[in-house]
Structures are given as C-alpha cells and as structure tokens.
Amino acid sequence: MDMNQVANASLFRGIPRVGIGICLDTLHAYEKKYRKGSIILHAGSKTDYLGLVLSGSVTIESNDVWGNCTVLSHVGPGQVFAETYALLPDSVMLVDVRANENCTIVFLKVGVLAKHELASDWEEKMFQNLLLISAQKNLTLSGRSFHTSPKSARGRILSYLNTVSLQKKSKEFDIPFNRQQLADYLNLERTNMSKELSRMQREGLIEFRKNHFKLLTETI
C-alpha cells in the first residue's frame, strides 16, 4: 500500500503519519485492484466499508432492471465512495460502483467508528473530513440537477461545460467521462448528444477531441 497516496487523500487531511498507521489497522484496511469495467460494489448489497481510490477512477451508476444507466458521479485518485453506506451499514445500496479504468482501491471499515464514542484525535479528524467530503458531494449532486434541468441537449451540454470551465478556471480542459458516460450523466441519448456536439463545433461554440474541450465564445 502506497502510504504517500493514502496520506495525501482528503480523508486523512490533518491526521499525522503515525495516526494514519493506527487508523489503517483499526479500520481493517485492505487493498484490492480492479480491471476496467468491473463492478466494485453492487446495488442491493450492504457495506460498512468505504472505498478510497489510490489510482485510476470509478463511476457511480444507477442501473435499472430494464438496462437504463445513469452516471451520477466520477471518483478519481484521492477521493472516496460509499462513505454514507459505510456509516449506515443497514442501508441497502441503490447504486453500482464500477471501475472506470484499471484501478487500485483501499477499503476502510469506517462503520466501526459509528458504533462507539470517538476516543482519539484521528477519529475526530476523520469524522470532520467525512463531513466535508459529504458536503462537497452534495454540491456535486446539486450541480448535476442543474445540468439535467434544461430541456434541450444543447442546454444540458452547455450547463455542464460551463461548470467544468469554472471549476478548472480555464476555457480549455479535459472532462472525466467518455462519450457514453457523458450522455448517461446528462440523461441524453448518445447519438443525439454527439450530433449536437458536432453542430456546436460547426457553429464555433466549442472545439473538442475525445474528452478534451475548448470553449470558444464569451457567452458560454
């Protein structure tokens, strides 16, 4: 396990190295590797472990019995997933967690922290970090609702690209999704979305190649 990667994760912000070692032991941490496309956690299951992405990335998806997929979020290196379910281990997961690429995950049994009073500094700090992480994820999910509220495909695409541009503080950036994932994230049909992207490029609103985008007008 790469301790530098672990220590740099937002979950361990403010926790000294010696505390991280104790934390990993107390929370029964273990590392596991997944190949691209593998399901890491299944909807309908329960867990008292959260996942910390050390390398690669994962997507959080809602897949129904009719085969419809909605991508809810992307989780990259240093970020965590399933933290709410881990703290509420009797709750059934409503989403799948899928390896977006080959990835390495460290699992931590944070559910044990909810079963007793916080007795050490690192436990208190970790709970503070989890609170901040949860708040950030709420903002992200709220942002997605803005992207899917416009009725037109163009409106949804522009809403998303504008948000990424603001976050990156640049009009040229990479997005974390491939074309199908972006369509799923925006609740659009992929073919129609691709046609709209091509129209927007012809009209001089954007330039793009694969997942790299450049916004070309001041009005976006």
Image: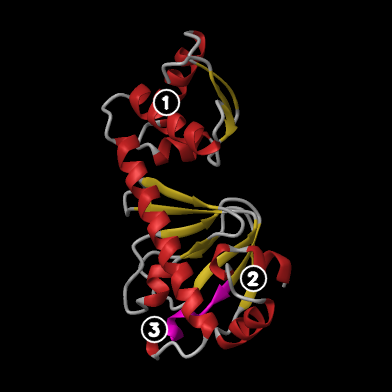
Q: Which residue is mark 1?
A: 193
* Disc 2, SS: strand
Q: Which residue is mark 2?
A: 32
In the rendered image, residue 201, in percent from the top left (x then y), is placed at: 51, 14
Q: Is residue 118 above or below residue 207?
A: below
In the rendered image, residue 114, in percent from the top left (x then y), is placed at: 39, 84
> What whole-number distance in Å separates the C-alpha atoms at marks 3 and 2?
24 Å
User: Does residue 59 show up?
Assistant: yes
Q: Nearer the viewer, residue 116 or 144?
A: 116
Q: Which residue is mark 3?
A: 114
Which image quadrant: the N terminus? bottom right
> What whole-number distance in Å separates the C-alpha atoms at marks 2 and 1?
36 Å
Magenta span contains residue 108: yes
Ranked by sequence position, the earlier of labels 1 and 3 is 3
- Residue at 54% x, 68% y is 11
- What amino acid does circle 3 point to? Ala
- Residue at 57% x, 53% y is 76
Q: Is residue 125 above or below residue 35?
A: below
- What amino acid does circle 1 point to? Met
Q: Residue furthest top?
A: 203
Closer to the camera: disc 1 or disc 3?
3
- What amino acid does circle 2 point to? Lys
> What whole-number distance in Å separates the C-alpha atoms at marks 1 and 3?
44 Å
- Residue at 27% x, 34% y is 149
Q: Nearer the viewer, residue 100 or 106?
A: 106
Quadrant position of residue 111:
bottom left
User: Does residue 2 show up?
Assistant: no
Ranked by sequence position, the earlier of labels 2 and 1 is 2
Span colored in magenta: 107-113
